[in-house]
Amino acid sequence: MGGCDVFEPTFESVSCPLCFGDEAELVFVAPDFLNGCPGEFKLVKCKGCGLLRTNPRPTKESIGYYYPDDYSPYQTSLVKNGEKKIIKPNSIISLIKKNLFGFYYNIFSLPKGRMLEIGCASGSFLDRMKVQGWSVQGVEFSEKSAKNALSEGFDVFIGDVGDFNSKPGMYDLIVSWMVLEHLHDPVFALKNINQWLDDDGWFVFSIPDASSIDFKLFGKNWYALQMPTHLFHYTPKNISKLLSNAGFSVKHIQWQPSSSNLFFSISYACRERGWAILERLSLDIAEGKRFIIVSNLLGRVLGMARQSGRMVVWAKKVVV
């Protein structure tokens, strides 16, 4: 791990994990907009099922080069002092979270039990759920971020989720926030998750939505594209099929009430055209520094219209 300053990546071409087809058409070529690592990367569309994937892609041994230590999720997931507050069901804060962050609110309302977070980064969500009464454990690829979580006293496995082992039926809830699109072998991971989950447990995760209007509008400037670290680019239809193949049944899909993807995408498009002032304005809005009320209202509209580009999937294992 360490990032783009040390750069000796190797690449591999892979078949589609959904239909196992090898034939694909080139959609476009894009750089690493998020971290600025060198190189250009191909987005291809499977001719068999339509699943989008980054191909060729960095191997497992090389992918760490594309995750610098200042990678945003590692920083934003740090546990902050003073945030360990139990949210009361009838409080004003609870009502706000119910309306603006429905996927968190629903998780908080589940019966307490054992939770595993895949891709726990520095541990903020582990901390939040522990405060709510859950027994928590995490898996994290980044050694530096995992050590941040370990320093807070959390039980975290450092390494790829494919190397993590657990007893069958161990967890009542398994979550992963914007992780599945990063995995080299999502089918293997999903089958393991199915085994680790209790028969009555939930698997809840968020991923970008490649069927969203902002992907259609912005193409290679779509913020959630994030090649080459995003290896697969899912839609509600194909993620449901992938889950079904791994023994899950999708119970509900929610779209996060957020406009950040849209404004980050606008900023990328402005950067490409050299519109520095508009790029800065779009970034400020995306980061919640300007026009907060308007941005939140737009996010609500996009979420209700299923066009925010960020979906949360609720799934249960099929018990036979």
Image: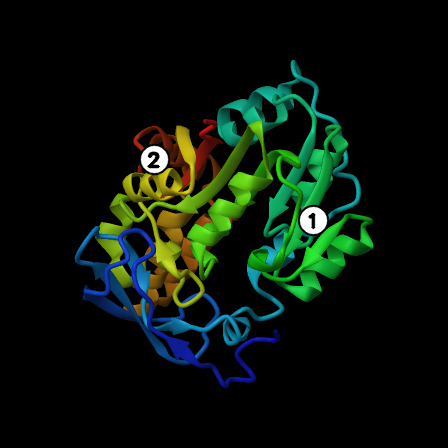
Crowding near the residue tagged with mark 2, few <14, some 14–19, many ≥20 C-alpha atoms within 10 Å:
many
Q: Nearer the viewer, residue 17 or 84?
A: 17
Q: Amino acid at mark 2?
A: Leu
Q: Nearer the viewer, residue 94 or 105?
A: 105
* Residue 66 located left or right of residue 56: right
Q: Are marks 2 and 1 in contact (CB under 8 Å)?
A: no
Crowding near the residue tagged with mark 1, few <14, some 14–19, many ≥20 C-alpha atoms within 10 Å:
many
* Residue 174 located left or right of residue 158: left
SS under mark 2 = helix
* Residue 181 located left or right of residue 84: left
Relative to residue 82, is residue 163 depicted above or below?
below
Camera-side mark, 2 or 1: 1
Q: Residue 175: percent from the left, percent from the top?
A: 56, 40
Relative to residue 319, is residue 46 depicted above or below?
below
SS under mark 1 = loop
Note whether residue 126 is visible: yes
The quadrant of the rendering that contains the N terminus is bottom right
The quadrant of the rendering that contains the C terminus is top left
Picture quarter containing residue 130? top right
Q: Which residue is mark 2?
A: 302
Q: Residue 244: percent from the left, percent from the top?
A: 37, 38
State which tag comes first along the sequence, 2 or 1. Answer: 1
Picture quarter containing residue 245? top left
Res 44 label: none
Q: Amino acid at mark 1?
A: Gly
Q: Residue at x 69, y 49 (%)?
A: 123
Q: Nearer the viewer, residue 59 or 308?
A: 59
Q: Residue 152: percent from the left, percent from the top?
A: 81, 50
Give the Cα separation between the discs numbered 2 and 1: 29 Å
Q: Which residue is mark 1?
A: 123
Q: Residue 159: percent from the left, percent from the top?
A: 64, 62
Q: Residue at x 44, y 37 (%)?
A: 312
